[in-house]
Image (spheres, rainbow, N blue to C red):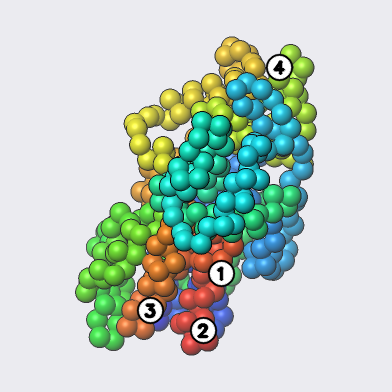
């Protein structure tokens, strides 16, 4: 019998395993995929450089993440370049802040009772003169926070937007995948066991131990179980529990989990630097009203690669193919750069589309705060019979929601619980 079984080998599960092994526990990590990393995954293929299909940035000061990078002797590179925005085919430098945004924050500061963002905008900014503001606030919430405005907490967004550190966006050298590789090596060196290709379907709690069953029929026994799979998997009910956990099931559904589709398009040359098109010199980020609205470069890396970001509730609706998504991305770039279809097709060297919503082992990208999230996290943060624990970025309540830092902090919290130090 393993002392502790961790379900999920994403960054949260791997970090928890590393920490628990250091405390002398026997640890087995059971992972559905044939690889570790979860929503951290880089690919190379025909690209000139490795590209991150999942988590990519370090957003501002992230102490646990920075500490791990130092341990792994990995550098981080501050993203450089200029921010552009395009609305109604008009180019402007900077972000897409509307003239009414100061008024928006004045009303946000007055808000004492939490309501969904859509209701807040309807209540305080319903006039025709605020149409652009409503559209841009909605676009930002659905874009960066990948949230459904009918459910996302307005108070939580207010605090997040106030504390945002847009000036300090880092790429970890070698990508987050290098950090995953570092943790895996430490786990193996410490005697931890990694079981890949074993999707867990059921967790049964007995009086003194737990039984974990996988899709293949394999069964693991443990004294304690830590579930670190993405919230979307739990919301879908891919893992069942006995005895049933109705309070936990309700908590899963009460929290927000958004979708992301990422596009990677590498060009033969940086077409955005060409004078015959809309020239966007030293492009870092572009925010637009195109179908795929947000794109960024690899600066200071000079590889002519752009990453596109398509997110929010719309990623869960409709039927589309990888090819149709790619064509939508190309159309967006044609609009953004004022470039002809023939010219942009000729300029593309390689491309890839990653759909996290239709990935059965993620069922989405990362969490966002709803009005019910605080109460739901409280339920999920309590051990069941001192035997079953939950961890992951969705259970984190600080200012770095939805990030790798959130996943690491949640894992650290559970490690302290299991070790009796929390």
Task: Please report the residue visible at 48 percent of the width from the left and 76 percent of the height from the top.
Answer: 414
Residue named by callout 1: 409
Task: Please report the residue visible at 60 percent of the width from the left and 42 percent of the height from the top.
Answer: 51
Task: Please report the residue visible at 46 percent of the width from the left and 82 percent of the height from the top.
Answer: 418
Compare marks 3 and 4 and give the one earlier in the sequence.
4
| Labels 3 & 4 near each other (Cβ < 8 A) | no
Taking the image as drawn, is residue 173 in sight?
no
Compare marks 4 and 2 and give the one earlier in the sequence.
4
Q: Is residue 272 above or below residue 3?
A: above
Q: Position of residue 326 (x, y in %)?
A: 49, 27
Taking the image as drawn, is residue 70 in sight?
yes
Residue named by callout 2: 422
C-alpha separation, residue under disc 4 versus residue under disc 2 = 57 Å
Residue 277: image tag: 4
Label 1: which secondary element: helix
Compare marks 1 and 4 and give the one earlier in the sequence.
4
C-alpha separation, residue under disc 3 versus residue under disc 1 = 17 Å
Compare marks 3 and 1 and give the one earlier in the sequence.
3
Q: How many labels does the image show?
A: 4
């Amino acid at each position: 019998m393993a002392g502790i079984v961790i379900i999920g080998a994403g960054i949260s599960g791997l970090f928890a395993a590393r920490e628990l092994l250091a405390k002398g526990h026997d640890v087995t990590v059971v992972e559905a995929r044939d690889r570790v990393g979860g929503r951290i995954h880089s690919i190379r293929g025909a690209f000139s450089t490795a590209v991150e299909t999942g988590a990519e940035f370090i957003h501002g000061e992230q102490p646990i993440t920075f500490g791990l990078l130092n341990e792994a002797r990995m550098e981080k590179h501050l993203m450089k370049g200029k921010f552009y925005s395009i609305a109604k085919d008009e180019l402007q430098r900077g972000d897409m802040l509307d003239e009414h945004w100061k008024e928006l924050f004045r009303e946000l500061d007055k808000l004492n009772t939490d309501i969904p963002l859509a209701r807040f905008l309807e209540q305080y900014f319903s006039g025709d003169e605020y149409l652009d503001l409503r559209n841009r606030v909605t676009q930002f919430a659905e874009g960066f926070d990948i949230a459904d405005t009918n459910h996302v907490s307005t108070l939580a967004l207010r605090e997040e937007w106030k504390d945002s550190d847009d000036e300090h966006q880092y790429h970890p050298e070698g990508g987050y995948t290098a950090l995953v590789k570092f943790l895996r090596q430490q786990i193996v060196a410490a005697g931890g066991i990694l079981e890949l290709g074993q999707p867990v379907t059921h967790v049964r709690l007995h009086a003194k131990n737990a039984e974990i069953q996988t899709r293949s029929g394999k069964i693991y026994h443990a004294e304690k179980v830590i579930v670190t799979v993405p919230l979307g998997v739990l919301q879908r009910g891919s893992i069942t529990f006995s005895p049933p956990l109705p309070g936990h099931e309700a908590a899963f559904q009460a929290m927000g989990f958004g979708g992301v589709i990422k596009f990677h398009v590498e060009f033969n040359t940086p077409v955005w630097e060409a004078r015959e098109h809309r020239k966007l010199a030293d492009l870092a980020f572009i925010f637009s009203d195109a179908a795929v609205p947000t794109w960024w470069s690899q600066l200071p890396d000079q590889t002519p690669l752009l990453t596109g970001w398509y997110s929010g509730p719309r990623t869960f609706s409709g039927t589309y193919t990888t090819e149709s998504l790619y064509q939508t991305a190309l159309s967006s770039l044609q609009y953004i750069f004022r470039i002809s279809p023939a010219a942009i097709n000729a300029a593309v060297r390689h491309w890839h589309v990653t759909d996290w919503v239709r990935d059965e082992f993620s069922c989405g990208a990362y969490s966002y705060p709803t009005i019910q999230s605080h109460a739901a996290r409280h339920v999920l943060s309590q051990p069941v019979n001192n035997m079953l624990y939950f961890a992951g970025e969705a259970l984190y309540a600080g200012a770095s929601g939805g990030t790798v830092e959130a996943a690491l902090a949640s894992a650290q919290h559970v490690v302290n619980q299991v070790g009796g130090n929390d």
